[in-house]
């Protein structure tokens, strides 16, 4: 069972969503006083990159 380009992009999208959620959760629950906005901004950035990966599926 080989992985084609769409499978790789699907896994990359899933991993980016998980990392984005974990960064937002770190900012909200653990580092609220220190750098919550920074963690949330990076998490939203991961979501936007995952959105691009998802849009590329089927076109590459």
Image (cartoon, helix red, strand yellow):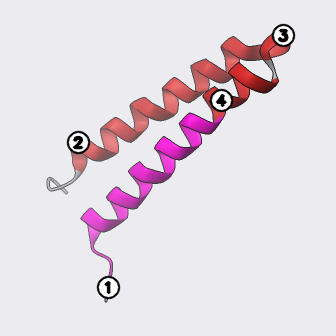
Of all residues, the one furthest to the right in this rendering is 34
Q: Residue at x 33, y 46 (%)?
A: 53
Which residue occupies 84% across, 10% down? Answer: 33
Label pair 3/1, CB-CB below 8 angstroms: no
- In this view, the mark in front (2 or 3): 3
Q: Residue 1 appears in which quarter of the rendering?
A: bottom left
Report the disc number at residue 25.
4
Per the image, label 1 sits on a secondary structure element best described as loop
- Which residue is label 1 attached to? 2
* Label 3, label 4: how far apart the Cα atoms are: 13 Å
CA distance separating discs 3 and 1: 46 Å
**Depth-wise, is mark 4 or mark 2 nearer the camera?**
4
Main SS class of the magenta portion in the image: helix
Badge 4 or badge 2: first in the primary sequence = 4
Count of residue discs: 4
Q: Earlier in the sequence, mark 3 or mark 1?
A: 1
Is residue 8 toward the left or the right of residue 22 in the image?
Answer: left
- Identify residue for label 2: 55
**Callout 2: SS:** helix
Q: Earlier in the sequence, mark 1 or mark 4?
A: 1
- In this view, the residue in front, 30 or 55, is 30
Magenta range is 2-22
The circle drawn on residue 33 is 3
Residue in the image at 69% along x and 17% along y = 38
- Which of the 4 image quadrants contains residue 39? top right
Separation (CA) of disc 4 from disc 2: 25 Å
Determine whether, in the image, residue 1 is placed left or right of residue 19. left
Judged from the image, the secondary structure of the residue bearing numbered disc 3 is helix
Nearer to us of marks 1 and 4 is 4
Q: Within the image, what quadrant is residue 40 found in?
A: top right
Dot 2: within a 10 Å radius of its alpha carbon, few (fewer than 14), some, or many (20 or more) residues?
few
């Amino acid at each position: 069972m080989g992985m084609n380009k769409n499978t790789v992009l699907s896994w990359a999208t899933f991993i980016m969503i998980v990392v984005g959620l974990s960064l937002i959760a770190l900012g909200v629950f653990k580092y609220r006083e220190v750098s919550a906005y920074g963690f949330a901004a990076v998490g939203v950035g991961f979501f936007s990159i995952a959105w691009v990966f998802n849009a590329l599926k089927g076109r590459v």
